Every structure is written in structure tokens, then in C-alpha cells.
Image: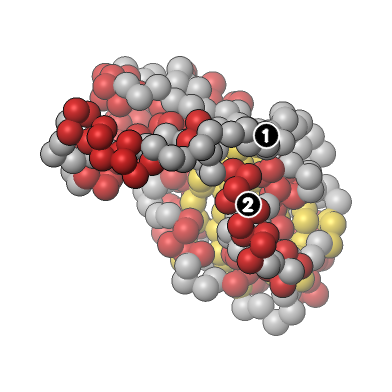
Amino acid sequence: MQLAAIANEKVTPLQMALRALPPVLFGARHAYAVPLTGSGTEESVQNLTRDDIAHFHAMWFKPNRATLIIVGDTTAAEIKPKLEKFFGAWERGEAPSKDLADVSRPNVPAIYLVDKPGALHSVVIAGTIAPPPDPHNEIALETMNNIFGGTFGGRLNMNLREEKHWSYGAASLLYGARAQRPFIAYASVQADKTADSISEMLNELTGITGAKPIRGDELEKVKQQQILELPGAHETMNSIGNLFSDLLQLGLPLHFYDSYVARVSALTIPELENCAKMLLDPSHMIWMVVADRAQVEESLNALAIGDIIPIEA
């Protein structure tokens, strides 16, 4: 279950939540404070000019800040002269640095409420800030998240969709980014179950390190999924290129997948529980809810999570 696929189905409340969340998590001036929908702001789009685009290109597109990835039936000796022919005149230059300064994780839980009058369903997101990618624990984090909500069979979806039938889909996602990155658990739920869904999400967040510890069969199932999906996920030239692009962008070593199968196979429940304690602590999460405020505010107050803060999308 991929967040982008759901967002592309024009689930407007989800798009509203993904626009409103980053500035709350990172602060308005951080490079990662832009809407996760990738659509900018109304003001920025309206004021955009051709000169702005040309200036952006001249400022950021530098060969010494770029990496070229080539996948195919060729060799360095064969391809290098062609690259020099087409790119040899590309001039080096300095580019600005983005503000990727560390920010503190949320430490005062609150519910940020985007009012959507008449909404028949609500979008609920629990969000926090995850650490930057680290080759030493990235696989453990991925595996823990797959058990919690990163796959269709994850606990969130099994609870809210398969057992409660309150949601068409619920999941969790650890965003890819070079610095600190968003982690979100989300669900689109029927409006009259908004507060109940948050309660269930809280139960799952705390349960994985408490009353509902990770089971051996859960871990083995996810291990097999992660290992067996590798060939199909990386069988085309395009997918191999994307794999290396992801590793480079995230600052992970290019040999990351050489030992992937062995490292997944060796994972233990205590390793994943340590990841869960670090990432899934509700005391370091904020909640973003897009719903009909008149219908849900009283029940949200009753949850006693924290202040309810109205916010614009």
C-alpha cells in the first residue's frame, strides 16, 4: 500500500493533511516544511515566472553537485567519450546549501484539526520525526515498520480495515530523505469513527512494545516478504537505476543491498522493539485530522491527547 497511490486517487482530505503536516513537524522555514503533495503553495504557484525557473536552474544545476547513473549493456570506456561530448561544456559552480538543520521531535502531543464541513470520512495522521537514514539500522526500521503498518498485512490495516471495517486502508510510512524525515501512521476512516480510530491507532502504537509484542511468526512473514520481493522489484534497468539513485540521495552505501538478505534473515525481535520504542512513542507525536469539525471535535476532546488546534490546509 503506497501513500502516493492513495493520494493520486484525489482523496482530498488526505491531500489536505499532507499539505498541513510538514510545517507543523519541521517549522515553516525548514527545507522539509514544503507540502508533501509536491504542489507548492497557492501564493508560490500564482507568482511563478519564467525568470524564476531560469534562475532556479542556473543556481542549482551544477555538474559538481550532480551524479550521473547509467544502467545498460555498455562500459565506462564506451560511454565516457559520449558523455564528454554532450556534457563537457557544462561549467562547474557553487550551489546554495539547504536548511537541513536538526529539529526537535514533538514533545507536546496535540491534535491539529483541519475543518472540512460535511465530510463523510476523516483522515487521521499521527506524525513524528525519524532520524536520518543509517546503514546500521535502516533495515531494522524498515522491517519494524512493515510489521506495524508498512504492508497491507501490517497491524494498522488489519485492525482498522479488516477487523473494524472503519477504513478502506490504513498504513504507516517512513519517508525517504537524507536528513531527519517524517514518519506517519495514517488512515482514512468513516467520520463517526474518527476518535475511535485514533484510540485504536494509539493502542497499536503502544502495544507493539507493550501488551502486543512482536510475534515470531509476524517477523518471519515480513522477513520472507522483504527477501522474496527483491528479484521482482529490481529486474528492469529502470528499477536498478532508481535503486542506486535512492541510495545516493539517502546517503547510503552503494553496496547496501549486497548483504541485505543476510541482514534481514538475522534480525531479532529485540532489535525491532528497540526501533519501535524509538519511533512509535505517542508522547513524541502530533495528530493531524481532516474532518467535519462540528461532528468530531467533542469526541476528539474526550480523548484527552492534548490541545485541539485549528489549522488551515
Indicate left or right for 136 with 14 as reference.
Answer: left
Label 1: element kind: loop
Kind of residue at disc 2: Phe
Residue 32, by quadrant, is: top right
Tell me if residue 116 comes above or below residue 228 in the rendering.
below
Residue in the image at 86% along x and 51% along y: 307
Residue bearing mark 2:
56
In three-dimensional space, the C-alpha distance between marks 2 and 1, rounded to whole angstroms, equals: 13 Å
Of residues 14 and 217, the one drawn nearer to the viewer in this rendering: 14
Q: Residues within 10 Å of mark 1 (few under 14, many from 20)?
A: few
Which of discs 2 and 1 lies nearer the camera? The answer is 2
Judge whether residue 110 can be spotted in this image: yes
**Residue 215, image x and y in percent?**
39, 30
Of residues 182 and 204, the one drawn nearer to the viewer in this rendering: 182
Q: Earlier in the sequence, mark 2 or mark 1?
A: 2
Indicate left or right for 233 with 4 as reference.
Answer: left
Indicate left or right for 271 with 218 as reference.
Answer: right
Q: Residue furthest left?
A: 73
**Residue 30, image x and y in percent?**
74, 42
Location of the N terminus (image quadrant) = bottom left
Residue 246, by quadrant, is: top left
Q: Which mark is residue 97?
A: 1
Judge whether residue 290 can be spotted in this image: no
Of residues 47 and 210, the one drawn nearer to the viewer in this rendering: 47
